[in-house]
Image (spheres, rainbow, N blue to C red):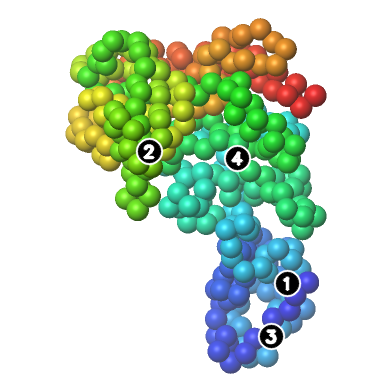
């Protein structure tokens, strides 16, 4: 419990407005709830959110100590009152979330604190009481993989330090493939092949450049691809990341003359299509074809991306999604817990 004594400069404010400034980590909806259930009182009596504070009033706040900390990147989860997650699988070790395009995975991707995927995941686990920050010395729930803000797909979150170590090792050992669905302009030739080159990242401009020969500071990049369908000057392409560089798929296909539809950074916007439905259509890890699992034979697991392009140009997208959400996805997920045995 913590008390606030109202001074002359704070007098005249509504209670909810004062709380927003004095306890910035406390979400407005949660503050309203605590006022209603009398975990926040004024002069040891029930108050209302629109109560006008007077000089000398004493507020009693019976809330967790974490809310009184100063806002930082590592406690932004406290500002999330109602986590919004599309969870496709969960056990005691990991959490698989289908991230929709437009959501940043981390604050340094340009998003404000409290609005990123990791903030919502940490808030979800905190509210479930599966994670207690003050009981941990160093560990916080973390992402095992990341995808760009404007890309949708499955992201793996580790609930424990051991799960994080195991999943990172699985990814490093390439026991999980990285496969994506993308719509590109034109038709790549040949219809199945590999894009190879060297990628240089310009952090100041937040973009990358692809060259055919090594340059100072560049790293090799490789993307295998297969054209699944072509129509109306566009192609649906399945991509397999051999390396995992920033903006790799977008930059490599643009360098090859086939920019992703709607990619204004590396290509150009196409007014024929709604931008919201023309960015990467991704089936991100771990739902891929040919997932190699320890002690298991190879399993065929179809991509789990959502078909988001309007107009029925590629009608097979909904079927791909439906199949993955059915037996293939469940078949893969049934083996995940064996990673930790």
> Which is nearer the eye, 276 or 35?
276
Residue at 75%, 21% (x, y): give it: 338
> Which is nearer the eye, 274 or 234?
234
Side of 240 relative to 136 (left or right): left
Element class at badge 1: strand
The numbered mark, 4 or 2, whose residue comes first in the sequence reads 4
Classify the position of the C terminus by image quarter: top right
Q: From the viewer's perspective, is the residue at label 2 or at label 1 nearer?
A: 2
- CA gap, disc 1 to disc 3? 11 Å
Element class at badge 4: strand
Residue at 20%, 29% (x, y): give it: 272
Residue 51 position, x and y percent, is 60, 77
The numbered mark, 1 or 4, whose residue comes first in the sequence reads 1
Residue marked by disc 4: 143
Residue marked by disc 3: 5
Mark 1: give few (<14), some (14-19) or many (20+) Cα within 10 Å. many
* Quadrant in the picture for residue 293: top right
Mark 2: give few (<14), some (14-19) or many (20+) Cα within 10 Å. some
Q: From the viewer's perspective, is the residue at label 3 or at label 4 nearer?
A: 4
* Quadrant in the picture for residue 181: top left
Residue 87 position, x and y percent, is 61, 33
Q: Is residue 16 above or below residue 288?
A: below
* Quadrant in the picture for residue 224: top left
Do the residues under discs 4 and 2 have CB atoms within 8 angstroms? Answer: no
The numbered mark, 2 or 1, whose residue comes first in the sequence reads 1
Which numbered circle lies on residue 61?
A: 1
Residue marked by disc 2: 218
């Amino acid at each position: 419990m913590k008390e606030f004594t109202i001074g002359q400069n704070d007098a005249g404010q509504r209670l909810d407005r004062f709380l927003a400034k004095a306890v910035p980590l406390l979400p407005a909806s949660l503050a309203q709830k605590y006022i209603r259930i009398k975990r926040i009182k004024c002069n040891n009596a029930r108050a209302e959110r629109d109560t006008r504070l007077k000089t000398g009033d004493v507020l009693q706040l019976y809330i967790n100590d974490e809310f009184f900390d100063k806002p930082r990147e590592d406690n932004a989860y406290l500002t999330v009152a109602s986590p919004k997650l599309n969870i496709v699988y969960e056990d005691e070790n990991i959490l698989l979330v289908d991230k929709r395009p437009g959501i940043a995975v981390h604050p340094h991707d340009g998003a404000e604190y409290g609005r990123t995927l990791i903030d919502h995941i940490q808030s979800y686990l905190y509210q479930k009481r599966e994670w207690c920050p003050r009981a941990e010395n160093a560990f916080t729930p973390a992402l095992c993989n990341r995808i760009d803000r404007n890309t949708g797909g499955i992201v793996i979150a580790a609930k424990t330090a051991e799960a994080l170590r195991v999943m990172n090792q699985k990814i490093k050992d390439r026991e999980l493939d990285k496969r994506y669905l993308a719509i590109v302009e034109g038709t790549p030739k040949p219809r199945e092949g590999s894009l190879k080159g060297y990628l240089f990242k310009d952090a100041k401009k937040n973009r990358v450049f692809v060259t055919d020969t090594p340059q100072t500071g560049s790293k090799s990049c490789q993307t295998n691809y297969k054209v699944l369908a072509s129509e109306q000057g566009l192609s649906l392409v399945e991509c397999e990341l051999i390396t995992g560089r920033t903006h790799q798929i977008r930059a490599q296909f643009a360098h090859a003359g086939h920019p992703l539809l709607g990619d204004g950074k590396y290509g150009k916007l196409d007014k024929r299509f709604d931008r919201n439905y023309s960015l990467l259509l991704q089936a991100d890890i771990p739902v891929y074809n040919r997932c190699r699992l320890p002690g298991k034979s190879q399993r065929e697991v179809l991509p789990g991306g959502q078909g988001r392009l309007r107009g029925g140009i590629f009608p097979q997208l909904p079927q791909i999604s439906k199949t993955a959400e059915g037996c293939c996805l469940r078949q893969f997920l049934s083996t995940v817990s064996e990673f930790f045995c």
